[in-house]
Amino acid sequence: MLKAKVHITLKSGVLDPQGKAVEHALIGLGFPGVGGVRQGKYIEVDLPEQRDKSKAKSQVEDMCKALLANTVIENYNVEVVD
Amino acid sequence: MKAAVIVFPGSNCDRDIALALEQSTGTPTTMVWHQDTDFPELDLIVVPGGFSYGDYLRCGAMAAHSPVMREVKRRVEKGTRVLAVCNGFQIVTEAGLLPGVLMRNRGLKYVCKDVHVRVEDSQSAFTAKYNIGDVLRIPIGHAEGNYFADHETLQMLEAEGRVAFRYCALDGEVTDDANPNGSQRNIAGIFNKSRTVLGMMPHPERLADAKLGGNDGRALFDALVETLA
């Protein structure tokens, strides 16, 4: 069975106040060398009927454009695995 | 004026805005469940505030693709007016009826308080009873009201006079201090190109009755009745 692993991230330049808060918390906990934190989403989509990886990828990319990501502010990256 | 309010699972401002409408129209407001696509001809459709579908994925994202919103899009093409408040604003941007997106507030917290907004347009069916420069006191209640759009979109909105309201100080000055959520250019509400769709984060229905502490929102409903009746 194919599975799509989708990473959704904020476009560079889009303010990420949650990432900033996590960054400050990590620095507050004393972790050295934290240069920046950006927070995103991870979504898995099971595709039990799909056999073709490239077709699966383009199908899930269509899902990203239609619903999973808001392309005004977000980028998406789709990886298809067995 | 025939008006309807769309009700999604998780809507919670639907009855408030129905009452505010009834006060101005004198007739009952139709309530339309989110799975209904077969509703009568209307002059106004309201997409109300709340937490449709529990804000899953992104605020408004699930509701934007519900059966009723497909019908709302068809009605917008025919010229039906749409008032989208708070979560409604998030829904219509996700549905592509208005440009941009409502992001998490700059301060990360849910903000619930009265704010001041400056009226930027008095030519639409929604704003005809205000004057440009009027300062209204209207409540907000949201965690994702930080309006974002790319530079070209913002320039287009400004050039076409499509900003309806901006957060401002009591004296009408548009300042960063008066911006409760980090919205670009202090934008609190915008129109579509034909000014038939208004999306706004503040809740006009919450101050549409002096008994509730103010009625700056009432003129919006009165204007709709006068224009569309």
Image: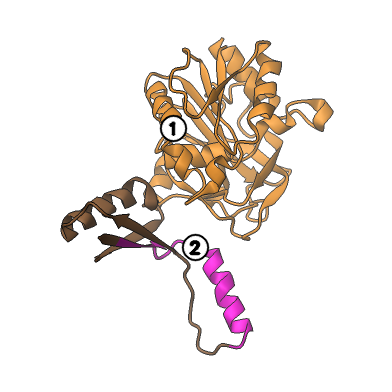
Chain colours: A brown, B orange
Name the chain under label 1.
B
Query: How far is mark 1 from mark 2, CA to CA?
Result: 25 Å
Subunit under mark 2 = A
Q: Quadrant of the C terminus of chain A?
A: bottom left
As helix, strand or loop, the secondary structure at mark 2 comes to loop
Residue at image coords 65%, 40%: B117
Q: Is residue A43 magenta?
A: no
- In this view, the residue in front, A49 or A52, is A49
* Image x and y of residue B27, in percent: 65, 10
Residue B172 in view of the camera = no
How many neighbours does mark 2 have within 10 angstroms: few (below 14), some (14-19), or many (20 or more)? some
Q: Amino acid at mark 2?
A: Leu
> Residue visible at 59% across and 59% down?
B106
> Looking at the picture, does residue B192 appear above or below residue A35?
above
Q: Quadrant of residue B170?
A: top right
Give the secondary structure at mark 1. loop
**Which label number is shown at residue B192?**
1
Depicted B158 relative to depicted A21: above or below: above
Residue at 29 percent of width and 61 percent of height: A3
Q: Which mark is residue A15?
A: 2
Relative to B115, is A5 on the left or the right? left
The residue segment tinted magenta is A4-30
Q: Position of residue B175 (x, y in %)?
A: 64, 52
Q: Quadrant of residue B160?
A: top left
Looking at the rendered structure, the kind of residue marked 1 is Asn
Of residue B40 and residue A5, the one placed in the foreground of this image is A5
> Which residue shows up at 61% across the image and 88% down it?
A30
- Quick check: B143 above or below B199? below
| Position of residue B147 measured from the top left corner of the image (x, y, whole percent) | 52, 49
